[in-house]
Image (tube, rainbow, N blue to C red):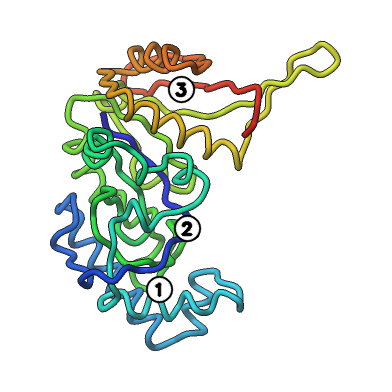
Amino acid sequence: MLVLLPPSEGKAASGRGAPLKPESLSLSGLAGAREAVLDELVELCLTDEDGAREVLGLSEGLRGEIAKNAELRTAGTRPAGEIYTGVLYDALGLATLDAAARRRAGKSLLVFSGLWGAVRVGDRIPSYRCSMGVKLPGVGALGAHWRAPMASVLPEAAGDGLVLDLRSSAYTGAWKPAGAVAERTASVRVLQSQVVNGVEKRSVVSHFNKATKGRMVRDLLVAGAKPKGPAELVEVLRDLGYTVEAQAPARAGRPWALDVVVTEIH
């Protein structure tokens, strides 16, 4: 099972470990595309602070993020699973998983990133600021920059197993599963169900969408679940106590769409 996650906008501080070793990152087929983004981002933040702030869409109060980017090659690193913070990662709670579940997380979780393309949670990276929506003067729009290298690398990473796509919309454009991989892919949205005047109303939740997805991934890791495809995933999630409504694709080569319905937001 390969689980695709969005990054967090906020990130923990860089660690005290050795500086970045780009060659050590997973998915070596993305190395060239990573270097192109890294080189331009570091150079921009070193030489043109005002331009960098505009390109990165940062407020005056976040000017310190530019200095962080300027030091990406020399800053300390820590596992990506510790760098990414926020609602989804708090609910996922990687640090509190048992050893077996942590091993599963290291093999199955893939975090998408405007800077790195995608990394595994055990890859050591520094803290940074660069969303997928950024358009660098040279490289261009990052979503488009990553499409070709992702298209050649991600199918191999997915293998012949399930792909559970939990990415936010900003990151889905960097790689869209196709063909046989798409048929083994399930994308998930979280809906809140409320009864108003005797009538059920459903709405897409935003903040708590992330928390539900984090808990769901944690439960799958703890259970050691190994669903081979979307239909099996639906059954596994239901066994774990989730209310899931599945929509199989209308034609071949398309992913499944799953709705996880919650009644309480917490």
Task: Using the image as rendered, state which of residue 176 and residue 200 is in the foreground.
Answer: 200
Q: Amino acid at mark 3?
A: Ala
Measuring from the top left, give residue 230's x and y in whole percent: 35, 18
For label 2, the residue is 133
Circle 3: is it few (<14), some (14-19), or many (20+) Cα within 10 Å? some
Residue 232, placed above or below residue 254: above
Residue at 24 percent of width and 69 percent of height: 17
What residue sits right under mark 1 in the picture?
137
Q: Quadrant of the C terminus?
A: top right
In depth, the one of 181 and 59 nearer the eye is 59
Q: Residue at x 28, y 67 (%)?
A: 77
Frontmost of labels 1 and 2 is 2
Q: Position of residue 167 (x, y in %)?
A: 43, 40
CB under 8 Å between callouts 1 and 3? no
Instruction: Please indicate whether residue 90 sits to the left or right of residue 61 in the image.
Output: left
Categorize mark 2 by other alpha carbons within 10 Å: few (<14), some (14-19), many (20+). some
Which residue lies under the disc numbered 3? 257
Estimate the spatial distance between the alpha carbons at disc 1 and disc 2, rounded to whole Å.
Answer: 13 Å
The mark closer to the camera, 1 or 3, is: 3
Q: Which mark is residue 264?
A: none
Please say if 175 is above or below 135: above
**In the image, what residue type sits under mark 2?**
Gly
User: What SS does tag 1 mark?
Assistant: loop
Q: Quadrant of residue 239?
A: top left
